[in-house]
């Protein structure tokens, strides 16, 4: 799906962000920053999120393997749960991200 999109937008500039073992909060910050740049110049822009539940299974496996502290595991599971909520929301993702960082978006939807 990503390769098809890139082929169809060969002459467009863009940013591709891939999830690896980065912390969920770091990824959320990048999504907010990069998503808000889309269309800033007044031109039409796309901000597309590719995700799958398989990603969450992989991250849960890594949490179990790499965290021995129960408190750290709980925090990591909470963060991945919020990331899954973000991926699956049918509401405005901009509003969702702003709320995550303690900010308020005044409208119901941003139109994105």
Image: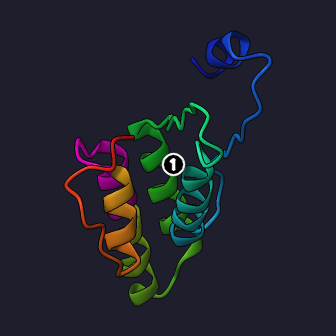
- Compare residues 43 and 88 and report the one nearer the observer: 43
Residue at image coords 80%, 18%: 11
Quadrant where the N terminus lies?
top right
Quadrant where the C terminus lies?
top left
Crowding around mark 1 (Cα neighbors within 10 Å: few <14, some 14 to 19, many 20+) is few
**Left or right, residue 104 beside residue 73:** left
- Compare residues 14 and 60 and report the one nearer the observer: 14
Residue at image coords 60%, 61%: 33
- Compare residues 111 and 16 and report the one nearer the observer: 111
In this rendering, the answer to whether 31 lies above or below 15 is below
Q: Residue 108 lies in magenta, yes or no?
A: no
- The residue indicated by pointer 1 is 58
The quadrant holding residue 42 is top right
Residue at image coords 71%, 41%: 15
Q: Position of residue 83 (x, y in %)?
A: 40, 58
**Left or right, residue 44 beside residue 9:** left
Extent of the magenta region: 82-92
């Amino acid at each position: 799906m990503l390769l098809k999109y890139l082929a169809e937008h060969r002459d467009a500039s863009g940013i591709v962000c891939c999830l690896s073992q980065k912390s969920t909060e770091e990824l959320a910050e990048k999504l907010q920053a990069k998503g808000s740049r889309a269309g800033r110049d007044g031109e039409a822009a796309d901000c597309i999120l590719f995700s799958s539940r398989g990603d969450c299974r992989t991250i849960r496996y890594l949490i179990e393997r790499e965290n021995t502290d129960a408190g750290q595991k709980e925090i990591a599971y909470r963060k991945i749960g919020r990331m899954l909520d973000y991926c699956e929301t049918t509401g405005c993702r901009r509003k969702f991200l702003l709320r995550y960082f303690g900010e308020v978006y005044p409208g119901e939807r941003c139109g994105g």
